[in-house]
Amino acid sequence: MSNRIIVEFSGWVEWDSDKVKFQYISNDDDQCTVITGTEWLKLSEDDRDDYILEDCIEAQKTSVDGSYEHMDVIIVDENHNEVTAIRTHS
């Protein structure tokens, strides 16, 4: 087994609701599988629970604004030991 790369981060982004996409995650096949944030905002709170952000990285790329508190890139060996880490804090 080779080393693994783990990325840990926290922060926030503001999305353009027309560009961000949500994926339907319920078992009801009659529903649309992917909707925009604009469509998602029109749903009831209960119906919103049936969706998940489609692509977090793409949403961050197309965000209107954002910041991160920290982003750590950690290399872990096959024995789950931290080999090295790059820690970035804003």
Image (cartoon, helix red, strand yellow):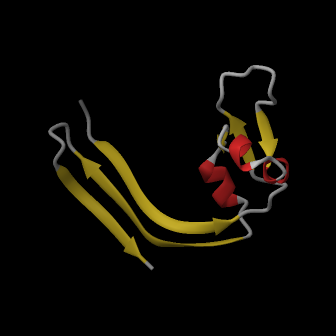
Task: State which quarter of the image contains the C terminus.
Answer: bottom left
Residue 83, x across and y down, in percent: 19, 53
Q: Nearer the viewer, residue 18 or 84?
A: 18
Image position of 85 (left or right of 43): left
Looking at the rendered structure, the number of numbered marks drawn on it comes to 0
Identified at 39% across, 57% down, the residue is 8
Task: State which quarter of the image contains the N terminus.
Answer: top left
Q: Is residue 62 above or below residue 40?
A: below
Identified at 80% across, 54% down, the residue is 41
Image position of 75 (left or right of 39): left
Q: Nearer the viewer, residue 6 or 14?
A: 14
In which quadrant of the rendered view does residue 47 lie?
A: top right
In which quadrant of the rendered view does residue 86 lie?
A: bottom left
Identified at 14% across, 39% down, the residue is 79
Image position of 62 (left or right of 42): left
Q: Nearer the viewer, residue 71 or 40?
A: 40
Which residue sits furthest bottom? Answer: 90
Q: Is residue 18 above or below residue 53?
A: below
Residue 67, x across and y down, in percent: 57, 74
Residue 14, x across and y down, in percent: 69, 67
Identified at 63% across, 72% down, the residue is 66
